[in-house]
Amino acid sequence: MKKKYFTLIYLIIIMIYSIYNLYNAKIMLLSYSNYYIKELIWFILGFIIIFLSTKINIDIILKNSKYLYILGIIMLICVHFFGININGSTSWIKIGKISIQPSEFMKIPLILSLRTISLKNYSNIKTFIICFILTLIPSILVFLEPDTGAVLIYILIFLAFTFMKKYNKWFYIISIVIIITLASSFLYLYFQKRELFISLFGSSLFYRMDRITNFINKDGYQRNQAISSLKSSKLFGRGTLIYFPESATDFAFTFLVSQIGIVPSIIYLIIYALFILNIKGNKQSDKYIKISLITILTFQLIINVLMNLGLFPIIGITLPFLSYGGSSLLSYMILISLTLKKVSDDTYL
């Protein structure tokens, strides 16, 4: 059986887990009551996109990706003028009864645009600078929403392309020194010059940094409630119901464990890992799109699970396909559809 069929089989199994988890989530909050229906609709729409992608010439999309990038930037700008605020972040635009999150879709044209530059016959430094600028623009716009999780995804995509380009060792050494210097300065301002930190970066970032401090101190209501829920979970079946915030999004995995047990949840993680490895094993996929997708899926899987286990600060990284979110789900389904198509190596975007 072809790799792409295994990809779809794993995806269907993951979908079943997700819908079942969101169906049960209504016991946490009444507002979650119709989440499973909405998520199922997004999944169906995603599978339709995957099916339609087999019927179109994907090179047409790749060659015109610069227009998709421009459209993505325009949508991010519109968020600041017409966006709606949810949980302290203005990241959504409402179109009728549907709310979309442009920052989730932006990763698609970003990947395609960085692929364009990587395929062109530029020098390494020129490639790096252009890719950096293309990543910096949406990162700033999304950071101001604020949406730290999306910014981290953009940076990760940029780093994936940087390592695929294979610069010389001195480039990496100098880059690491610069990153360490900037990070040290940033932390010095936060811990020693807090008023200056807030004036430079705003109170929103200061609050997000406090989340990391709470993690170091093993403090925080959300973290402690989630860990209590995990501790009360059984090997199989539903454990003791303990309320914790964001049980349908950031902490969907904790809720899954509390509902079906530890062993079935581990099986879910194994299926998820096999799903990622199957994407990697598709030799016909474009390497730039494939490696970018694998990188961000693996990153989100690891960081989200660690967050849920209380081993990593809560930074707004969700678990794709399990956490509720139509924009996130659909954006990944589109990326999967791109990995299932054979793309010419010389196809410029």
Image (spheres, grey):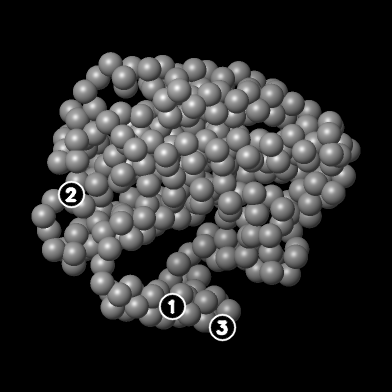
Q: Position of residue 303 (x, y in %)?
A: 58, 53
How packed is label 2: few (under 14 Cα within 10 Å), some, or many (20 or more)? some
- Toward the left, the furthest residue is 121
Between label 2 and label 3, give the one nearer the viewer: 2
- Which of the 4 quarters of the picture holds residue 168? bottom left
Q: What residue did someone put label 2 on?
A: 119
Image quadrant holding the C terminus, namely top left
Q: Is residue 61 above or below residue 228?
A: above
Q: What residue did someone put label 1 on?
A: 180
The three-letter code of the residue at mark 3 reads Gln
Q: Earlier in the sequence, mark 1 or mark 3?
A: 1
Between label 1 and label 2, give the one nearer the viewer: 2
The three-letter code of the residue at mark 1 reads Ile
Any mark on residue 192, and which? 3
How packed is label 3: few (under 14 Cα within 10 Å), some, or many (20 or more)? few
Image quadrant holding the N terminus, namely top left
Q: Is residue 241 visible?
A: no
